[in-house]
């Protein structure tokens, strides 16, 4: 199976807010495959948009850079950094 697909760019685990009686805590939950793909596309677009803002590069060049970095699993990719951050928070809240 090809590991460089979009579904590997999205977080595998996330955390949600669970509360009762005014007490709110975060609970780690698994992420569905469709949400992983949607989240990956969202993070890639957001990263490309932010990197092209006030930059000489065009949006298409920034999007290409983001896709290449995400495919390499590079920490330069906005999507990979956010995915790692989300999974780190979920691991703490297990």
Image (spheres, rainbow, N blue to C red):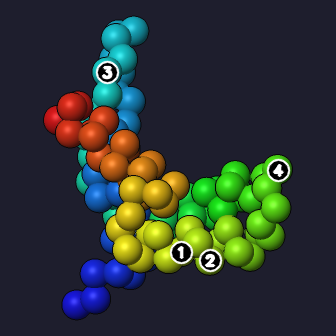
Q: Dot 3 lies on which element?
A: strand
CA gap, disc 1 and disc 2: 5 Å
Q: Dot 2 lies on which element?
A: helix
CA gap, disc 1 and disc 4: 20 Å
CA gap, disc 4 and disc 2: 17 Å
Q: Are marks 4 and 3 in contact (CB under 8 Å)?
A: no
Residue 33 visible here: no
CA gap, disc 1 and disc 3: 35 Å
Tell which residue pokes out farthest to the bottom in this image.
Answer: 1
Q: Position of residue 60 (x, y in %)?
A: 74, 76
Q: Earlier along the polypeptide chain: callout 4 or callout 3?
A: 3
Q: Quadrant of residue 65?
A: bottom right
Q: Quadrant of residue 9?
A: bottom left
Q: Residues within 10 Å of mark 2 (few under 14, many from 20)?
A: some
Q: Identify the residue at horizontal 53%, vertical 74% (top origin).
A: 67
* Label 2 sits on residue: 64
Q: Position of residue 25 (x, y in %)?
A: 31, 21
* Label 4 sits on residue: 54
């Amino acid at each position: 199976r090809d590991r460089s697909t979009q579904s590997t760019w999205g977080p595998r685990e996330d955390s949600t807010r669970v509360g009762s009686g005014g007490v709110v805590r975060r609970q780690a939950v698994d992420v569905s495959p469709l949400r992983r793909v949607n989240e990956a596309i969202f993070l890639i677009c957001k990263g490309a948009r932010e990197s092209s803002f006030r930059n000489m590069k065009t949006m298409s060049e920034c999007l290409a850079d983001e896709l290449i970095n995400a495919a390499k699993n590079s920490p330069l990719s906005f999507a990979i950094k956010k995915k790692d951050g989300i999974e780190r928070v979920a691991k703490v809240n297990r």
